[in-house]
Amino acid sequence: MRNAILAQSITRQNVGNALRLMRHECRYNAAEVTALNKAGLELEASPWQYDGEMLVITSRTNGNTRYTITFSGCDCKAGQHGRRCWHMAAFLLIQRAAQLALTPVKPRMSDAEYERVLALCDEI
């Protein structure tokens, strides 16, 4: 049940936020950034399913082919040869988006609360 809730909680906003974070984390690795960018585009354009542990995504070049990606790897040609593919980047992106979806949003302070905290800091 938890995986179903997890998969349903992924939104475009979560994916966008995850993409932004992951791009920043690997900003010095051009190949990783390229894979993430492609993954972001393909998740938007290609049909995919995620159950919390496995991502199944339709091939970009052949609509009859689907790739299965797990933490173990991807069953595409690159993945079978141990190379990193955009499918794996998409899987990691969806994983991060799911993580963000389950992270409670910290409520913002009201202006009155902020002023109160500032006054307390001034007293110290």
Image (cartoon, rainbow, N blue to C red):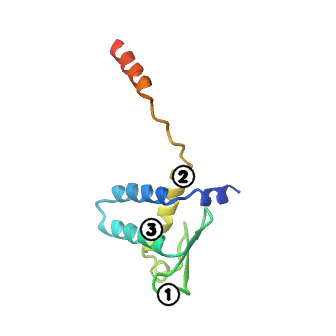
- Residue 70 percent location from the top left of the image: 56, 69
Residue matched to label 2? 101
Q: Is residue 55 visible?
A: no
Residue matched to label 1? 62
Q: Which callout, 3 or 1, points to the residue nearer the camera?
A: 1
Determine whether 90 is above or below 105 in the image: below
- Dot 1 or dot 2, earlier in sequence: 1
- Dot 3 or dot 2, earlier in sequence: 3
- Dot 3 or dot 1, earlier in sequence: 1
Seen at 36% across and 59% down, the residue is 23
Tell me the crowding category of disc 1: few under 14, some 14 to 19, or many 20 or more residues within 10 angstroms, Cα based: few
Residue matched to label 3? 89
- Residue 51 percent location from the top left of the image: 63, 65
Q: Amino acid at mark 3?
A: Ala
Determine whether 96 is above or below 45 in the image: above
Determine whether 103 is above or below 83 in the image: above
- Residue 93 percent location from the top left of the image: 47, 62
How far apart marks 3 and 2 lie (CA) works out to: 18 Å
- Residue 86 percent location from the top left of the image: 43, 73
How far apart marks 3 and 1 lie (CA) works out to: 19 Å
Q: Is residue 9 visible?
A: yes
Which residue of the protein is positioned furthest toward the front in this rendering?
111
